[in-house]
Image: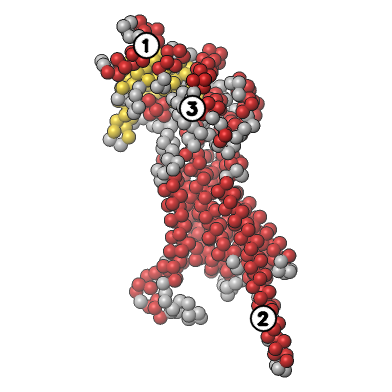
């Protein structure tokens, strides 16, 4: 992939009169794990919805894998994987049945094999024959990630992936994201509130405040830049309070 | 892609409890239609036999058995009522769950973040609903035919089978209208409960209110065989009577009665004319639903309450 994996230039979005994104400029290089931070209503999910082609930006341009999210929607959707917050899948179908459907929609040649391989890779092959409706949040999240990576996308979008998970689930998710990035080379774009996870998994962070991107840098550079702050949480709070 | 969506939808419906409960009710009612026909026939024949015996004792001549004059399919006359009542609700739920489940569970976002055209998604859903309804009606056709042969001891001719098939074909068209109503209401509402309520509202209007307005309002309409009730000369009733040809439920019932030979026969052209409003509404709803799917904001979904 030549050029950035994700690129946004002057992206604005409004719901009626309410402007939620106010001209976002952002570039994320291939292989990065990008943590997108911001308080509730800052516009993080809207940004992901635009990058996953679910929403058309009111203004500006966004490219994923080099393709424009509006003009080349199909090409973009072929190279991304997406796990929204609080996705429940089809509760009355088994994990394998759910995954086979999504594999077919993604144009995977041998869906059954892809499902088996992905579940095996993620270490949850034992869930294949069970109904998703009977799953705990952690198990559901594992299958959610499986559906997002079935077709081996270049870019993976995760929207609040740790929401509702217990500490063990969070740890498992962290390990999975790291493996997907390091072993399969996926670029990861992660919306999150859990700052402890950002420090452990992400290579770069961006902070969104009232629809504007107020900060973007690597984790390393960020901790150097704010030497007085004890943790990433302190840095984040400082950024939110003093956006300039 | 259309086939993938349709096959998945059909697979999913096999485990939908509400849908399965309604399907069971519909098939039981289909079987009951034959039993009820048999029951009423048996009662009338008993009365007839008692009357014949009485008349013979008095030395009078007995009239012919009234059931010998009735067409075989008339024993299924109740089906023309069950289809608008239970069948239409079943179709409505079918259309509702087709789209609402995807929206409420967040699956819609997963689908549209993949290389899936909205038109393919919509056609897959509509196709699945049409195939499922066709399968239900085929089963219903078999149950009806078997109940006529076994319970009522009636021999079915090729013409009877053709009429029965025509009735179920007509029912398929009619039920597809309600499946699309179920889909359109999901696409228009923000909450799932509102979508279902709106769909049931449309069903009530089409099944009860409109026929009542276009025919039932005429105060002397029940004075059969008065063909031109006095009241329709009043402007109000003239106005309501004009809506009669467009009342889909009324036209469905009337066309069904003609096909099942429970109403006086009419020309094929007249029966086809009765079907036209159903086809017209079906096409209109298809176009509206297709337009709404294209414009639908897949990032939000529907509140599952």
Chain for mark 3? A
Q: How far across and down, in percent of the image, does residue A151 sit?
A: 57, 25
- Among numbered discs 3 and 1, the one appearing first in the sequence: 3
Chain for mark 2? B
Reading the image, the residue beneath label 1 is: A231
Q: Quick check: A106 above or below B241?
A: above
Measure the alpha-carbon separation of dots 3 and 1. Answer: 28 Å
Q: Which residue is drawn at 67% across and 70% down?
A: B38
Reading the image, the residue beneath label 2 is: B47
Q: How far across and down, in percent of the image, does residue A195 sit?
A: 40, 17
Q: How far across and down, in percent of the image, does residue A236 sit?
A: 34, 16
Kind of element beneath mark 3: strand
In the displayed structure image, the side of residue B160 where residue A149 appears, left or right: left
Kind of element beneath mark 1: loop
Reading the image, the residue beneath label 3 is: A83
Q: Nearer the viewer, residue A82 or A2?
A: A82
Q: Which residue is drawn at 48% across and 80% down?
A: B223
In the rendered structure, find residue A218 and report the number of the disc placed on it. none
Quadrant of the snapshot with the C terminus of chain A: top left
Q: Which of B158 and A187 is in front in this view?
A: A187
């Amino acid at each position: 992939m030549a050029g950035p994996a994700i690129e946004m230039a002057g992206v604005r979005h409004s719901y009626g009169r309410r402007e939620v994104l106010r001209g976002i400029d952002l570039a994320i290089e291939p292989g990065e794990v990008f943590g997108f931070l911001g308080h509730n209503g800052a516009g993080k999910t809207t940004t992901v919805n635009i990058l996953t082609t679910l929403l058309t930006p009111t203004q500006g341009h966004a490219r994923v894998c080099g393709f424009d999210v509006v003009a080349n929607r199909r090409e973009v959707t072929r190279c991304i994987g997406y796990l929204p917050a609080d996705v429940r899948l089809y509760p009355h179908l088994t994990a394998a049945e759910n995954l086979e459907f999504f594999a077919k929609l993604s144009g995977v040649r041998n869906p059954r094999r892809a499902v088996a391989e992905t579940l095996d890779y993620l270490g949850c092959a034992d869930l294949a024959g069970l109904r998703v409706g009977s799953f705990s949040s952690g198990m559901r999240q594992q299958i959610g990630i499986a559906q997002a990576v079935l077709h081996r996308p270049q870019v993976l979008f995760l929207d609040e992936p740790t929401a509702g998970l217990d500490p063990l689930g969070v740890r498992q998710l962290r390990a999975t994201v790291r493996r997907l990035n390091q072993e399969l080379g996926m670029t990861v774009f992660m919306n999150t509130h859990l700052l402890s996870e950002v420090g452990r998994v992400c290579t770069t962070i961006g902070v969104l405040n009232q629809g504007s991107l107020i900060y973007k840098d690597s984790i390393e550079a960020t901790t150097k830049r704010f030497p007085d702050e004890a943790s990433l949480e302190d840095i984040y709070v400082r950024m939110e309070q003093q956006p300039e | 892609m259309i086939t993938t969506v349709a096959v998945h939808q059909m697979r999913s419906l096999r485990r939908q409890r509400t849908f399965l409960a309604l399907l069971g009710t519909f098939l039981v009612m289909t079987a009951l239609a034959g039993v009820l026909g048999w029951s009423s026939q048996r009662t009338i024949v008993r009365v007839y036999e008692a009357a014949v015996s009485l008349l013979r004792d008095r030395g009078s001549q007995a009239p012919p058995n009234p059931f010998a004059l009735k067409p075989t399919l008339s024993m299924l006359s109740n089906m023309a009522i069950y289809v608008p009542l239970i069948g239409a609700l079943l179709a409505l739920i079918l259309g509702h769950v087709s789209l609402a489940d995807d929206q409420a569970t967040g699956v819609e976002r997963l689908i549209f973040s993949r290389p899936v055209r909205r038109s393919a998604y919509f056609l897959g859903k509509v196709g699945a609903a049409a195939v499922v309804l066709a399968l239900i009606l085929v089963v219903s056709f078999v149950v009806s035919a078997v109940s006529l042969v076994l319970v009522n001891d009636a021999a079915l001719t090729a013409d009877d089978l053709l009429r029965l098939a025509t009735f179920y074909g007509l029912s398929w068209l009619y039920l597809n209208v309600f499946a699309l109503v179920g889909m359109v209401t999901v696409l228009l509402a923000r909450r799932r409960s509102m979508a279902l309520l709106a769909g049931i509202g449309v069903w009530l209007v089409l099944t009860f209110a409109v026929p009542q307005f276009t025919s039932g309002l005429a105060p002397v309409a029940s004075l059969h065989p008065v063909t031109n009730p006095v009241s329709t000369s009043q402007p109000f009733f003239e106005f309501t009577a004009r809506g009669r040809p467009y009342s889909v439920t009324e036209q469905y019932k009337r066309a069904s009665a003609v096909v099942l030979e429970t109403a006086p026969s009419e020309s094929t052209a007249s029966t086809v004319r009765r079907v036209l409003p159903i086809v017209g509404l079906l096409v209109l709803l298809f176009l509206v639903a297709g337009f709404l799917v294209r414009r639908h904001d897949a990032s939000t979904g529907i509140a599952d309450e």
